[in-house]
Image: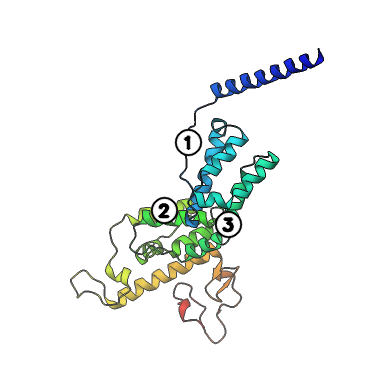
């Protein structure tokens, strides 16, 4: 009699499990994200495949199924030669009945992830130049590489300095003509976009040539151009001083020129103080 009761109880548990499984299948939501492309083992595609498969499992995990289904989902989203690489993880899961798909992702990360990608992105960001690209194209490149370099949380002054360094000479010349520039990175980018939409500057201001047009042609005389370029250099130094506390007198960081202990002052022999407006910092030793 006890054996019959035990057999009936076992059959009852089996039927309950089947009912529970059917109920889960019936109420399982439909997937919302498309299936990612199978990972082919190419290193340059791993950075896009990994977040895609993680997003799929995070959003559609219930629709995919339990841990076993999710494990096989990751395994089947690999090309055959990559599957062969993680085959030991599959065997281990079968033996232990512990179906953790992150063991597959961790091994793939050790093989295909580039540990130097942040440093390489920083180097690429610092060497990025606008050239003949439109300002929108330059901003798009800069923003993408900035996030690759994990620089989205850098201080605004660092982002502005790096962004400004890559601009072409025309836009940098227009920036030098501005009396006040924003100190926050988003506002600085907006100002650059506005300045980039203005009409072209005279050739003498963009190319740096000192030769002008003849009198009466509307051009600048050489001495006038030199004065304009000197004003631009002085404005650039004022902006650098304001953003980075850079003293153009002693060329040290941490204080402004008005606080410089090394600047020349009036003395008894009639020598004049250093004029900030006319100081050419490039000729100092």
Real-space CA distance between mark 1 and mark 2, rounded to the nearest whole angstrom = 26 Å
Q: How many numbered marks does the figure carry?
A: 3
Element type where label 2 sits in the image: helix
Residue 116 point in image, percent of width and height: 56, 62
Compared to residue 84, the image places residue 131 above or below, namely: below
Out of 125 and 94, give the one closest to the viewer: 94
| Residue nearest the observer in this picture, 94 or 281 | 94
Kindly state the secondary structure of the residue where label 3 is placed. Answer: helix
Residue 219 in picture, x, y percent from top left: 23, 71
Image quadrant holding the N terminus, namely: top right
Where 269 falls versus 250 (above or below)? below
Residue matched to label 1: 33
User: Residue at the spot x=37%, y=62% of the render?
Assistant: 171
Where on the picture, by quarter, is residue 213?
A: bottom left
Pick the front one: 187 or 41: 41
Which is more foreground, mark 3 or mark 2?
A: 3
Q: Position of residue 104 (x, y in %)?
A: 60, 47
CA distance for labels 3 and 2: 30 Å
* Residue projecting furthest to the top: 1
Mark 2 neighbour density, 10 Å: few (under 14) some (14–19) many (20 or more): few
N-term mark: 1 or 3: 1
Q: Nearer the viewer, mark 1 or mark 2?
A: 1
Provide the residue designation for mark 2: 140
Q: Residue 208, which numbered label?
A: none
- In terms of secondary structure, where does tag 1 sit? loop
Q: Are marks 1 and 3 in contact (CB under 8 Å)?
A: no
Nearest to the observer: residue 181 or residue 102: 102
Q: Is residue 282 visible?
A: yes
Q: Quadrant of residue 66?
A: top right
Residue 200 relative to residue 241: left or right: left
Report the disc number at residue 111: 3
């Amino acid at each position: 009699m006890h054996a019959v009761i035990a057999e009936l109880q076992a059959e009852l548990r089996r039927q309950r499990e089947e009912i529970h499984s059917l109920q889960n299948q019936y109420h399982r939501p439909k997937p919302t994200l498309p299936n990612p492309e199978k990972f082919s083992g190419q290193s340059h595609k791993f950075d896009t495949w990994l977040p895609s498969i993680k997003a799929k499992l995070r959003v559609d995990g219930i629709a995919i199924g339990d841990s076993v289904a999710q494990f096989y989902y990751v395994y089947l989203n690999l090309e055959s030669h990559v599957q062969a690489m993680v085959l030991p993880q599959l065997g281990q899961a079968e033996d232990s009945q512990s179906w953790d798909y992150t063991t597959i992702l961790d091994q793939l990360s050790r093989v295909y992830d580039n540990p130097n990608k942040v440093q390489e992105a920083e180097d690429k960001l610092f060497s990025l130049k606008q050239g003949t690209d439109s300002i929108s194209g330059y901003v798009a490149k800069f923003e993408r590489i900035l996030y690759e370099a994990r620089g989205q949380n850098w201080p605004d002054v660092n982002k502005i300095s790096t962004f400004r360094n890559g601009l072409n000479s025309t836009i940098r010349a227009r920036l030098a003509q501005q009396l006040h520039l924003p100190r926050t990175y988003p506002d600085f980018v907006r100002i650059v976009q506005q300045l980039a939409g203005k009409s072209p500057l005279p050739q003498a201001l963009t190319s740096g040539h000192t030769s002008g047009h003849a009198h009466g042609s509307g051009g600048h005389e050489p001495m006038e151009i030199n004065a304009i370029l000197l004003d631009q250099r002085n404005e650039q130094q004022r902006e650098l001083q304001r953003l980075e506390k850079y003293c153009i007198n002693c060329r040290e960081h941490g204080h402004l020129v008005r606080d410089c202990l090394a600047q020349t002052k009036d003395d008894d022999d009639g020598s004049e103080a250093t004029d900030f407006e006319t100081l050419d910092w490039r000729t100092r030793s």
